[in-house]
């Protein structure tokens, strides 16, 4: 009787241990399923727009380049993020950013209806709106009054705060064009068109690619100047702070200037 009782006790102990081991394994497996991997890849979904914005964002099929793209990819790598390009139409960008479909886009604060709803990085580069003038023109520009009675080729839908009162009064005329490239062709071949308004880097990029860089000069006086930044959702504020630190390092070690020189 004593022997049978001892055997039964051993069997019960083994059964209890087996049940405990099974329970622990199940709990561990559940925990592993629920907990995110420490090695999970971090992705930054970056809007490059369907047609890009050369030379800041250049889209050629599935290949991306440009000043802003190169900087974002370089900084993201330092922060252990992989950048994924998303092509979002301009009118949908802000809402899709708020809804989490993308994580960031390029923007100047001054171009944003509600900048307080977002987080912005430090400027990567400045957008400088200047006048592109045919090289053989006697055109001079220092103050808006120098443009009275002139006709300027402008981008359709763009606003130029320094000149809006003059456009509204008709003292300065604007001739709207939908494509940046065409602005320069109109100035060269159109009638009574005096100059084109464009961002300095954008204009020089187009002229270089069209073989027209010797046909124009730019005014030293700027119509406007805005910092071109990353715009992010507010929860990405830590990323923005880290981005700013890395961006400053790129400025100090000359890497940012090297990137800019590739597109000038």
Image (tube, rainbow, N blue to C red):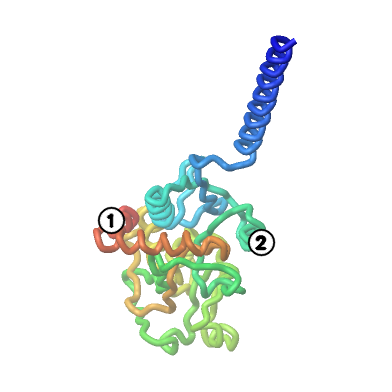
Residue sticking out furthest to the left: 253
In the rendered image, which quarter contains the N terminus?
Answer: top right
Numbered circle sitting on residue 95: 2
Q: CA distance from mark 2 to mark 1?
A: 33 Å
**Residue lying at 53% horizontally and 58% vertically, measured from the top left:** 104
**Residue lying at 35% horizontally and 59% vertically, measured from the top left:** 246
Taking depth in this image into account, of 45 and 80 the one nearest to the observer is 80
Specify whether 193 is left or right of 138.
right
Specify whether 92 is left or right of 209.
right
Taking depth in this image into account, of 150 and 232 the one nearest to the observer is 232
Numbered circle sitting on residue 175: none
Residue 197 placement (x, y as % from top left): 46, 71
- Tell me where residue 90 sits by quadrant: bottom right
- Tell me where residue 235 sits by quadrant: bottom right
**Residue lying at 34% horizontally and 75% vertically, measured from the top left:** 219
**Residue lying at 29% horizontally and 63% vertically, measured from the top left:** 251
Whichever of labels 2 and 1 marks the residue nearer the N terminus, that label is: 2
Q: Which structural element holds mark 2?
A: helix
Let me know if residue 91 appears in the view: no
Residue 31 placement (x, y as % from top left): 62, 38
Numbered circle sitting on residue 255: 1
């Amino acid at each position: 009787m004593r022997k049978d009782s001892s055997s039964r006790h051993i069997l019960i102990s083994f059964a209890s241990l087996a049940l405990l081991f099974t329970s622990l394994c199940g709990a561990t497996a559940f925990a592993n399923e629920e907990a995110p991997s420490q090695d999970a890849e971090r992705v930054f979904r970056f809007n490059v727009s369907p047609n890009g914005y050369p030379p800041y964002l250049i889209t050629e099929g599935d290949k991306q380049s440009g000043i802003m793209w190169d900087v974002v990819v370089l900084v993201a790598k330092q922060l252990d993020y992989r950048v994924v390009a998303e092509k979002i139409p301009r009118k949908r960008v802000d809402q899709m950013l708020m809804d989490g479909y993308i994580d960031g886009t390029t923007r100047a604060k001054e171009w944003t209806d509600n900048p307080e709803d977002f987080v912005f990085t430090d400027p990567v580069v400045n957008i400088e709106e200047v006048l592109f003038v045919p090289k053989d023109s006697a055109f001079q520009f220092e103050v808006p009054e120098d443009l009275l009675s002139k006709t300027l080729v402008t981008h359709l839908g763009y606003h130029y705060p320094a000149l809006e009162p003059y456009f509204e009064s008709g003292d300065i005329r604007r001739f709207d064009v939908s494509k940046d490239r065409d602005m320069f062709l109109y100035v060269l071949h159109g009638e009574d068109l005096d100059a084109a308004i464009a961002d300095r880097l954008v204009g020089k990029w187009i002229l270089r690619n069209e073989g027209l860089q010797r046909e124009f000069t730019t005014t030293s006086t700027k119509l406007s100047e805005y910092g071109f930044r990353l715009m992010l959702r507010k929860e990405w504020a830590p990323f923005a702070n880290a981005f700013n630190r890395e961006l400053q390092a790129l400025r100090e070690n000359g890497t940012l200037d090297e990137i800019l020189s590739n597109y000038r």
